[in-house]
Image (spheres, helix red, strand yellow):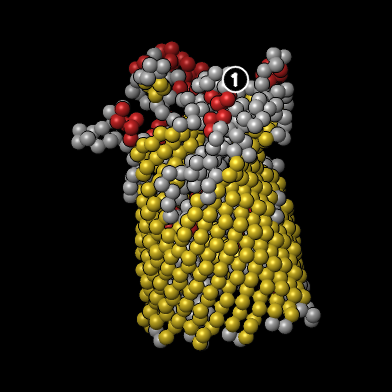
């Protein structure tokens, strides 16, 4: 997919604001590069719901760092300045398209539409544009007008050993005909019977249809697209499991059923979308653009679960050798000869057969069939969690060129979103019955108690495959904003100012009356209202001789997103306590030098977020319960330096160097409120999370490479280094009250807090070679990309600490140490080994 591929441009980037000479609102249009320059896969973009979704791909024609870093560092899911992707705004024809509930853009919604997403305007964090005030991570606006797409046919075929192994793509754009009509279309199919990771598969069909009509000073555009996808996913595992499998891509989510592979985590994702755009060129200096967008996204993910039985996960800690013998050497109780013999037996069982390290589906069916004769509910089943969204967006922007060197933009956006969240029974695995009751709480409340009912309006409902159970609710969100910006250039100075004001309102509408919250789960909650807004200033000075220095400053109040606003949305209508706007300060000082042989960028930045809210939910099998956790009042800092250099050694050979050293961490502790789903009561505490880092992205990264381009050939070779990759921390380890009860305090009275787990970094070598051939009719291009040529599979790309304690609670309230150490066994993802893609494309 290409170096200009807009799948690579999702998350905007850094800039030096070096556009002092640009009079067109500092708005840049990405130059059209051949797709063979490089290709991104869904794995690199973090499409897998079990991996990091916060991927930032950078690209900027004006910046030696930003133009390369997104592609080069994408295999480790690099995020620009470690920002969450919700701080990067994405637009299509001027309409905002970030997911309203999560704040992030869904990459999969335009997957496979490489040629259709080639036209993009990008505004860097402190640049102006004509579609909104740029966010802390920048903004992109994709142009889906048919008349703007390169005319002609294009056919490409590709083979790979990544998430998918085969891809076929056809695209066509007519350009405008004599009657002012333009048409465009795209069809892409991606497939893998097995992806790079065993137990996974991929099946996806992408489509795009567009039409545009010119009518005097008016243009009317319509486009519709979608990407129905079914894919099996990969799970994280501990180093012990990877060691037993002798494979850093071990996947615990699949197993054998009747001799065939079956994955327990299958995602179905489809978001059919359509938009209508009216462009009105009022006069030579004034233009009005209005877009209406509608989308219905359907997302579901399956999961194997159990009821009144043992955990069927093949990597469950009780099955691992280290749960029998204390390999950490600190507890003699678990270092006896019998413990060592048990360790050896578990090791032999798991290491001698792949089948023993995978889900035994046949055993689960047999267990359910046995209990059928007793009239008992299913012991094992596959559930499906649904998150669907119906979205309607209206956006309009007026652009006015006041003079040749000054431009004013004014616009608004209004969004209504209804999110449907529920769970269905996907497969009873041969069982006859299952009831909609909270079996987790049976040990806490007597059988027959109303507290055990998931839905008091339909008590003890018998659940069949396809029926809803457990939870069912909708989230209603309405938001809007009015924005404006002004840019001006005079002499050596270019500056811009921007401001916006907005409103966000959200509520929950419960469809089940949960027994633990009989009066606060069914029907609508109150509505939380937030007034937001902010302003930005940027300026750059042309020092002549290719030197430009720039400064950017911004401050904003940003409303919390709906996915962190409710304490336990699967159970009740309660909002998170102390829910407030985030207060965001951002700044950047940058220098750019550009002449015939050197293009260099150096920037330093500092950003701070106050009043951040974070939310997690995890299964806590110490007490056989789900735990809903909210952190509020959290303050964060992001700062660092970025350097990019492009030396032109000869007319056909460039030397490129770039790197970043950054910090992204909590600078305060937080208030925590948590609730266990079997009890229905809240506990307030302090989470000692100061100095915890942002996870899933390298905070230190660098690259050195050579780029050869001559005679239709292009060869790129890059050595990349990554370090300081942190894993997602667990607040549970760091609650103040348990640490106090355990007397985890040093001699000076400070709490002894577990350090955040890190993943191993390292060096990777990547390369690309390709050839473009002009034919009598059209052109042919051949491209081979190889990532991780040296097959370094020890680099960690992400993971998380397990939210479990190293001790168990006794009935009298005392504790006893476990043999297994959760604190020393975080779950990780490792980078793919040598992988690549060969692509052939014909354009005519």
Question: Residue 168 versus residue 30: which sits nearer the camera?
Answer: 30
The C terminus: image quadrant: bottom right
Question: Residue 209 versus residue 514: which sits nearer the camera?
Answer: 514
Q: At 28% from the left edge and 36% from the top edge, which residue is drawn?
A: 751
| Residue 686 place in picture, x, y as percent | 35, 39
Left-right relation of 106 to 760: right
Quarter of the view holding residue 96: bottom right
The N terminus: image quadrant: bottom right
Quarter of the view holding residue 4: bottom right
Q: Is residue 197 visible?
A: no
| Residue 83 place in picture, x, y as percent | 45, 55
| Residue 658 place in picture, x, y as percent | 43, 62
Q: At 71% from the left edge and 50% from the top edge, which residue is drawn?
A: 228
Q: Is residue 747 visible?
A: yes
Left-right relation of 204 to 625: right
Q: At 55% from the left edge and 44% from the top edge, which residue is drawn?
A: 525
Left-right relation of 642 to 456: left
Q: Could you say whether the residue bearing mark 1 is in a helix, strand or loop?
A: loop
Q: At 57% from the left edge and 53% from the top edge, which residue is drawn?
A: 477
Mark 1, other Cα within 10 Å: few <14 / some 14–19 / many ≥20: few
């Amino acid at each position: 997919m290409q170096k200009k591929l807009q799948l690579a441009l999702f998350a905007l980037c850094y800039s030096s604001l070096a556009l002092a000479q640009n009079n067109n609102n500092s708005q840049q249009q990405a130059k059209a590069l051949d797709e063979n320059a490089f290709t991104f896969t869904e794995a690199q973009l973090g499409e897998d719901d079990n991996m990091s979704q916060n991927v930032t791909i950078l690209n900027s024609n004006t910046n030696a760092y930003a133009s390369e870093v997104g592609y080069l560092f994408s295999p480790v899911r690099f995020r620009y300045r470690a920002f969450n992707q919700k701080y990067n705004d994405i637009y299509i024809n001027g309409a905002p398209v970030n997911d309203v509930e999560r704040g992030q853009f869904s990459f999969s919604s335009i997957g496979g539409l490489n040629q259709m997403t080639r036209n993009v305007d990008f505004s860097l964090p402190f640049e102006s544009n004509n579609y909104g005030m740029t966010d802390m991570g920048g903004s992109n606006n994709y142009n889906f007008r048919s008349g703007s797409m390169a005319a002609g046919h294009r056919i490409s075929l590709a083979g790979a050993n990544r998430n998918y192994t085969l891809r076929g793509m056809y695209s066509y754009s007519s350009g405008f005909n004599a009657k002012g009509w333009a048409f465009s279309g795209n069809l892409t199919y991606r497939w893998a019977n097995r992806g790079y990771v065993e137990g996974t598969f991929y099946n996806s069909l992408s489509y795009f249809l567009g039409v545009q009509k010119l009518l005097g000073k008016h243009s009317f555009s319509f486009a519709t697209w979608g990407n129905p996808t079914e894919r099996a996913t990969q799970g994280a595992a501990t180093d012990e499991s990877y060691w037993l499998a002798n494979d850093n891509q071990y996947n615990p989510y699949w197993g054998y059923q009747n001799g065939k592979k079956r994955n327990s985590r299958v995602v179905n994702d489809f978001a059919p979308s359509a938009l209508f755009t009216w462009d009105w060129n009022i006069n030579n200096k004034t233009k009005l653009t209005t877009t209406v967008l509608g989308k219905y996204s359907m997302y579901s993910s399956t999961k194997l679960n159990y009821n009144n039985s043992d955990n069927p996960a093949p990597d469950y800690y009780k099955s691992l050798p280290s749960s029998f013998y204390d390999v950490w050497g600190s507890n003699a109780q678990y270092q006896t000869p019998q413990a060592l013999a048990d360790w050896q037996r578990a090791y032999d069982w798991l290491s001698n057969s792949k089948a023993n390290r995978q889900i035994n589906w046949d055993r689960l069916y047999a267990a359910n069939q046995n209990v059928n004769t007793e009239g008992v509910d299913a012991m094992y089943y596959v559930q499906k969690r649904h998150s669907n969204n119906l979205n309607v967006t209206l956006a309009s922007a007026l652009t006015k060129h006041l003079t040749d060197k000054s431009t004013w933009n004014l616009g608004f956006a209004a969004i209504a979103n209804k999110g449907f969240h529920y769970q269905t029974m996907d497969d009873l695995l041969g069982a006859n019955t299952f009831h909609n009751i909270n079996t987790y709480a049976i040990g806490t409340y007597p059988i027959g108690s109303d507290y055990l009912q998931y839905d008091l309006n339909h008590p003890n409902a018998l659940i069949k495959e396809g029926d809803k159970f457990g939870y069912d609710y909708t989230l209603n969100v309405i938001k809007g904003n009015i924005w404006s910006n002004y840019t001006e250039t005079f002499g050596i100075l270019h500056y811009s100012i921007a401001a916006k004001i907005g409103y966000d309102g959200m509520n929950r509408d419960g469809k089940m009356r949960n027994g633990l919250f009989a009066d606060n789960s069914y029907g609508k909650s109150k509505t939380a209202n937030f007034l937001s807004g902010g302003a930005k200033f940027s300026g750059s000075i042309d020092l002549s001789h290719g030197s430009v220095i720039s400064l950017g400053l911004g401050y904003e109040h940003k409303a919390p997103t709906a996915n962190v606003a409710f304490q336990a949305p699967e159970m009740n209508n309660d909002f998170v306590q102390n829910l407030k706007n985030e207060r965001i300060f951002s700044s950047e000082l940058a220098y750019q030098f550009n002449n015939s042989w050197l293009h260099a960028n150096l920037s330093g930045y500092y950003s701070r977020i106050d009043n951040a809210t974070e939310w997690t939910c995890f299964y806590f099998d110490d007490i056989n319960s789900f735990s809903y956790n909210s952190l509020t009042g959290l303050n964060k800092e992001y700062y660092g330096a970025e350097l990019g250099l492009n030396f032109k050694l000869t007319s056909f050979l460039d030397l490129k160097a770039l790197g970043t050293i950054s910090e992204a961490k909590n600078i305060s502790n937080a208030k925590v409120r948590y609730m266990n789903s079997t009890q229905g009561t809240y506990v307030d505490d302090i989470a000692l999370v100061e100095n915890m880092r942002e996870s899933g992205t390298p905070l230190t990264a660098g690259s050195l490479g050579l780029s050869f381009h001559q005679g239709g050939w292009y060869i790129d070779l890059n050595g990349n280094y990554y370090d300081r990759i942190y894993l997602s921390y667990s607040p549970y380890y760091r609650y103040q009250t348990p640490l106090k009860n355990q007397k985890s305090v040093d001699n000076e009275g400070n709490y002894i807090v577990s350090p955040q787990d890190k993943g191993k970094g390292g060096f990777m070598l990547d390369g690309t070679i390709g050839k473009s051939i002009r034919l009598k009719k059209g052109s042919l291009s051949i491209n081979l990309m190889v990532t991780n040529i040296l097959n370094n599979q020890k680099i960690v790309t992400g993971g998380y600490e397990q939210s479990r304690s190293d001790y168990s609670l006794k009935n009298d309230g005392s504790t006893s140490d476990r043999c297994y150490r959760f604190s020393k066994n975080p779950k990780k993802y490792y980078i793919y080994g040598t992988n690549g893609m060969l692509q052939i494309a014909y354009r005519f």
